[in-house]
Image (spheres, rainbow, N blue to C red):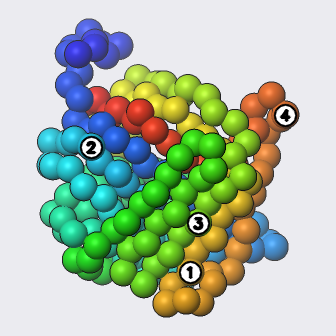
């Protein structure tokens, strides 16, 4: 356990990984957002899930729809990456989610008819904060973040338009697509 800035004890509520991506068009408009969850343990159980926003529709896919719905409501809706997107009540689908990820090569995920590929690792670094605001209040977050050069999303075999935005410096590259591991959320 750790203490927050105010001194109260913060307890772990989730441990796992949450890679994510945003794809953009030539005008800088978001064309797709995906949040891929590999939950090793949480106060709501363990499992995998994909949250996808595309064309104004939010889809949540997991074998454990209760866990996946909690991930979408508790975490994803509060992420800065989705602010400004028309975020409607999600279509929740019970289906197998398969994820293969390593920090050398990237990620491949399949959920229902959704296929996500991420690759071209740019960096690996530690991130930690005791001031991550979610709808339920302030949280602590620590993780290893791995920005990547490329990502694709397809739905039913059709490619979703858009590309990854890469920025930052050679010493600290950034990307709108990233892997994570050793992710721990505390409340």
Task: Using the numbered discs, state the Cα–Cα distance from disc 4 to disc 2 in whole angstroms.
Answer: 32 Å
Left or right: residue 98 compared with residue 33: left
What crowding class fits label 1: few (fewer than 14 Cα within 10 Å), some (14-19), or many (20 or more)? Answer: some
Closest to the observer, 164 or 88: 164
Between disc 4 and disc 3, the foreground one is 3
Residue located at (71% from left, 60% from top): 150
Res. 99 image quadrant: bottom left
Work out whether residue 29 can be spotted: no
Left or right: residue 177 compared with residue 141: right
Closest to the observer, 56 or 41: 41
Between disc 4 and disc 2, the foreground one is 2
In the drawing, what numbered circle is on residue 170?
4
From the image, which quarter does the N terminus lie in? top left
The residue singled out by tag 3 in the image is: 117
Left or right: residue 94 compared with residue 158: left
Placement of 67 over or under 129, stated as above or below: below
The residue sitting at the right extreme is 170
The residue singled out by tag 2 in the image is: 40
- Pinpoint residue 83: horizontal percent, then vertical percent: 51, 58
Task: Using the numbered discs, state the Cα–Cα distance from disc 1 to disc 3 in whole angstroms.
Answer: 9 Å
Placement of 141 over or under 177, stated as above or below: above
- Pinpoint residue 112: horizontal percent, then vertical percent: 36, 81
Residue located at (27% from left, 43% from top): 40
What crowding class fits label 3: few (fewer than 14 Cα within 10 Å), some (14-19), or many (20 or more)? Answer: some
Q: Secondary structure under badge 4? A: loop
4 or 3: tag closer to the N-terminus: 3
In the drawing, what numbered circle is on residue 154?
1
Q: Are circles 1 and 3 on residues that touch, CB within 8 Å?
A: no
What crowding class fits label 2: few (fewer than 14 Cα within 10 Å), some (14-19), or many (20 or more)? Answer: some
From the image, which quarter does the C terminus lie in? top left
Left or right: residue 115 compared with residue 43: right
Task: Using the numbered discs, state the Cα–Cα distance from disc 1 to disc 2 in whole angstroms.
Answer: 26 Å
């Amino acid at each position: 356990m750790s203490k927050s800035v105010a001194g109260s004890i913060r307890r772990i509520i989730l441990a796992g990984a949450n890679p994510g991506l945003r794809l953009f068009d030539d005008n800088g408009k978001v064309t797709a957002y995906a949040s891929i969850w590999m939950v090793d343990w949480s106060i709501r159980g363990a499992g995998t899930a994909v949250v996808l926003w595309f064309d104004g529709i939010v889809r949540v896919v997991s074998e454990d729809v209760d866990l996946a719905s909690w991930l979408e409501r508790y975490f994803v809706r509060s992420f800065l990456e989705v602010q400004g997107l028309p975020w409607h009540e999600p279509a929740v689908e019970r289906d197998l989610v398969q994820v293969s990820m390593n920090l050398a090569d990237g990620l491949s995920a399949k959920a229902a008819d959704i296929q996500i590929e991420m690759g071209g690792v740019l960096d690996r670094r530690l991130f930690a904060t005791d001031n991550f605001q979610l709808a339920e209040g302030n949280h602590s977050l620590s993780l290893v973040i791995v920005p990547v050069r490329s990502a694709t999303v397809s739905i039913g075999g059709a490619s979703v338009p858009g590309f990854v935005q890469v920025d930052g410096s050679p010493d600290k590259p950034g990307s709108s697509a990233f892997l994570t591991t050793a992710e721990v959320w505390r409340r």
